[in-house]
Amino acid sequence: MANMALLDAINFKKGCYTGQEIVARMHYLGKLKKRMYRGAVECDEAPKAGDKIFAENSTAGTGTGVVVSAEMNAEGKYEALAVIQIADAEGQVLKLGDVEGAVVEILELPYGFATGEK
């Protein structure tokens, strides 16, 4: 979910590492449903790690996403890294916390993917 596979930061052909079985299973058998996104939110209080991200028509029954970290930028908005359901991040209006929360705007990541994905 931290975009490591998309950045070619994992070699599936050599070495052993913690979590290797889970990562290999995802790579060879499944499709990742969540990944790391960068977002901006304008709110009075800083988002905290663990804060939920909400989408009204979420494709996931357990929640759309969760904030990993957040800091205020030069424009007075908070920028956050969050793990979010891919289907929701790319097709839903996202809110911080719940339906009444501040809108979370998805921003481009500061790096590109080897696969050409955004």
Image: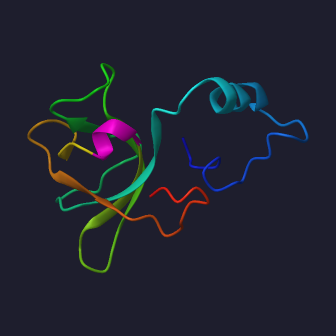
Is 56 drawn above or below residue 67 in the view shown? above
* Residue 21 quadrant: top right
Task: Report the coloring of the rendering.
Answer: rainbow
Is 62 drawn above or below residue 93 in the view shown? above
- 112 vs 71, nearest the viewer: 112
The reply, left or right, for residue 98 in relation to residue 33 is: left
The reply, left or right, for residue 117 in relation to residue 57 is: right
Q: Residue at x 48, y 56 (%)?
A: 117
Image spot of residue 83 (x, y percent): 43, 42
* Residue 79 quadrant: bottom left
The magenta stretch is: 84-90
Is 81 drawn above or below residue 95 in the view shown? below
- 20 vs 45, nearest the viewer: 20
Q: Residue at x 64, y 49 (%)?
A: 4
Q: Is residue 88 magenta?
A: yes
Q: Is residue 63 magenta?
A: no
The N terminus - image quarter: top right
